[in-house]
């Protein structure tokens, strides 16, 4: 007999070797913060995510997770993607089903080279519901990688087959649903019966696959505005096609052929052109515009983007002046607190909106102002005699998380403001139905920068990330469609770059750490990517946005 400690109930269970952990799982778990009940979807075994059909052969600590846990949500979403893929094969065996990228209203799905009609979407929804009712099991099989590659090629999944080939592995795990093979690079739920909550929303040439809302798991996520974001991703997807790098497998092949520097130069040239396009739009309306607001989520490259846009405005003959929104926080005693009782510096109310609005209006009237400087140690602003006024050719450039929120400066003439949204919106995919999370991309950026600049260990960055994400969902993402233009700071070569820096940091996280599960997930993801070499990294120019994270920036 071996000992299994269950974190959920605090009890030890003596079990036989080979025992399936699903037998220990309760039907539901209770969220300690909300008191809500959630069905069990997967388990953390010694902080590593495992499917419920996993068997134990030595003592372990097991924690069962539901949709309230990030790993539970990802498990549900992987499984739902496979369900949609299987239903599409049943109904339309002559069409190639693809999951392109994540949008505010769900995963954007389509058929290759053709539009999906509303009638086909209805049929697909009903077929998915039928498969849910059948409660079909997801099964896993270990096989030779060459055999898996052959299966994917036969299923018209060249990106998936190409990724397997680029990895050069001897064996791999393949999931099966109702006789069809696929892989989603992580555990799945036990069966289709666990996937009762979903919907399909017609959109563009396809539809959004909607999964349960985090606030109410009995309903799909609400529909949101997403046209501008979609156009940005579409533009980047077209760029990926023109370079021939639409998947991780294609990227790996290019790097292994020694073409990394060529790709770096091409990506940087395109990004320089995109910054110039933003500056051109502002310059075209210079007679009315006096303020540029730039917003974006954590590690989207807001600081570098604002400097690069300012640089391009100088090229056009304008004189950009920078005001840092971080200097407009209220005194510490007036700072709001979050649900855990901690200071919420990301809330709009944490800023002195009255002072900000008054000073912007004064500048627009041609008056001179004295800029504040916020002392974060003492928790209050100071005025030290630094003054500013705007001349005819001057333009303000300000970046901050609330820059797209109309409630930030409602008293200021909105026609004088140009708003830019920056984020790392990669359209690169692992394969036909597994898109890369832009959130993971930003987390890796932040981890590398935090460790290099602030001396923060990766464990702390990972543990703080859920709080950062909550702030983004509240204060940034709801307003991204308010932007006059959206800028994509993602670069095709950055995951191979980030792997070089992030992988050693992640490997330092101990198995007994609460961050170990997330570190393991990220390391597993990075295993599919070929890393850049130091000689190739040296080719990244000092003005690159990625230099903000790895160092060596000269902006």
Image (tube, helix red, strand yellow):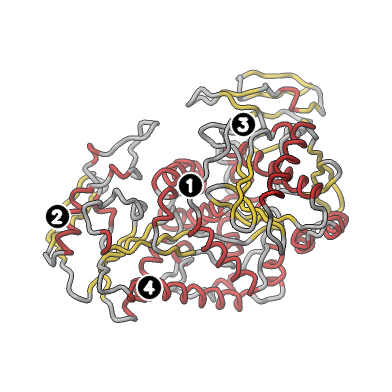
Counting residues from the N terminus, which is met first, the one under dot 3 or under dot 2? 3
Marks 4 and 2, Cα distance to the nearest angstrom? 35 Å
Disc 1 target residue: 461
In three-dimensional space, the C-alpha distance between marks 4 and 1, rounded to whole angstroms, equals 36 Å
57 displayed left or right of 452: right
Q: Residue 492: x and y, percent?
A: 59, 67
Give the total of numbered labels.
4
Q: Earlier in the sequence, mark 4 or mark 2?
A: 4
- Mark 3 is surrounded, within 10 Å at the Cα level, by few (under 14), some (14 to 19) or many (20 or more) other residues, namely many
Q: Residues within 10 Å of mark 1 (few under 14, many from 20)?
A: some
Please tell me in which quadrant of the rendered image residue 166 appears: bottom right
Characterize the local packing of mark 4: few (<14), some (14-19) or many (20 or more) Cα atoms within 10 angstroms: few
Of the 4 image quadrants, the one containing the C terminus is: bottom left
Q: Residue at x 22, y 47 (%)?
A: 352
Quarter of the rendering occupied by the N terminus: top right
Sequence-first tag of 4 and 1: 4
Q: Are marks 4 and 2 in contact (CB under 8 Å)?
A: no
Q: Residue drawn 51% across and 24% down?
A: 32
Q: Earlier in the sequence, mark 3 or mark 4?
A: 3
Would you name the residue on which mark 4 appears? 281
Task: Measuring from the top left, give residue 141's x and y in whole percent.
Answer: 84, 43
Residue 383's label in the rendered image is 2
* Distance of label 3 from label 1 (alpha carbons): 23 Å
User: Which mark is drawn over residue 66?
Assistant: 3
- Mark 3 vs mark 4, foreground winner is 4
Say if mark 2 contacts mark 1, CB within 8 Å: no
């Amino acid at each position: 007999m071996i000992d299994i400690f269950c974190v959920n109930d605090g009890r030890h269970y003596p079990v036989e070797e080979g025992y399936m952990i699903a037998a220990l799982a309760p039907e539901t778990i209770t969220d300690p913060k909300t008191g809500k009940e959630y069905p069990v979807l997967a388990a953390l075994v010694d902080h590593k995510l495992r499917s419920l059909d996993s068997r134990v052969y030595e003592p372990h600590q097991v924690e069962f997770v539901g949709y309230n846990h990030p790993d539970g949500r990802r498990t549900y979403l992987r499984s739902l993607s496979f369900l949609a893929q299987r239903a599409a094969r049943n109904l339309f065996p002559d069409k190639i089903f693809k999951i392109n990228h994540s949008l505010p209203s769900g995963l954007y799905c389509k058929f290759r080279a053709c539009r999906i009609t509303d009638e086909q979407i209805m049929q697909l929804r009903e077929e998915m519901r039928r498969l849910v009712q059948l409660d079909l099991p997801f099964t896993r099989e270990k096989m030779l990688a060459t055999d898996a590659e052959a299966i994917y090629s036969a299923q018209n999944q060249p990106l998936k087959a190409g990724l397997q080939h680029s990895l050069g592995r001897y064996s791999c795990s393949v999931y099966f649903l109702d006789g069809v093979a696929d892989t989603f690079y992580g555990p799945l739920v036990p069966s289709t019966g666990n996937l009762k909550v979903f919907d399909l929303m017609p959109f563009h040439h396809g539809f959004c696959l909607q999964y349960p809302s985090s606030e109410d798991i009995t309903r799909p996520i609400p529909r949101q505005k997403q046209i501008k974001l979609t156009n940005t991703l579409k533009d980047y997807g077209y760029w990926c096609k023109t370079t021939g790098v639409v998947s991780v497998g294609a990227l790996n092949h290019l790097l292994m052929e020694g073409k990394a520097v060529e790709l770096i130069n091409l990506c940087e040239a395109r990004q320089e052109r995109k910054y110039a396009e933003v500056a051109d739009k502002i310059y075209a309306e210079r007679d009315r515009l006096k303020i540029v607001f730039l917003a974006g989520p954590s590690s989207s490259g807001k600081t570098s983007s604002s400097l690069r846009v300012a640089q391009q405005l100088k090229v056009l003959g304008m004189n950009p002046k920078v005001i840092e929104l971080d200097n407009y926080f209220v005194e510490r005693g007036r700072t709001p607190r979050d649900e855990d009782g901690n200071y919420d510096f990301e809330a709009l109310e944490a800023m002195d909106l009255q002072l900000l609005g008054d000073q912007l209006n004064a500048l627009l009237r041609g008056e001179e102002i004295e800029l504040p400087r916020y002392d974060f140690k003492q928790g209050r602003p100071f005025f030290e005699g630094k003054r500013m006024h705007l001349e005819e050719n001057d333009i303000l450039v300000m970046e901050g998380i609330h820059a797209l929120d109309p409630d930030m400066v409602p008293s200021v003439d909105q026609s004088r403001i140009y708003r830019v949204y920056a984020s790392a919106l990669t359209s690169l995919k692992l394969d036909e139905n597994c898109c890369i999370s832009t959130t993971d991309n930003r987390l890796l950026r932040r981890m590398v920068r935090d460790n290099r600049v602030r001396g923060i260990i990766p464990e702390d960055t990972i543990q703080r990330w859920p709080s950062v994400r909550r702030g983004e969902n509240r204060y940034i993402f709801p307003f991204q469609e308010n932007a006059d233009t959206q800028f994509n700071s993602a670069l095709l070569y950055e995951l191979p770059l980030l792997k070089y820096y992030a992988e050693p940091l992640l490997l330092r996280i101990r198995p007994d750490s609460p961050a170990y599960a997330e570190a393991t997930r990220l390391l597993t993801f990075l295993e599919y990517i070929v890393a850049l070499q130091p000689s190739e990294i040296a080719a990244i120019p000092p003005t690159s946005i990625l230099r903000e994270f790895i160092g060596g920036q000269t902006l």
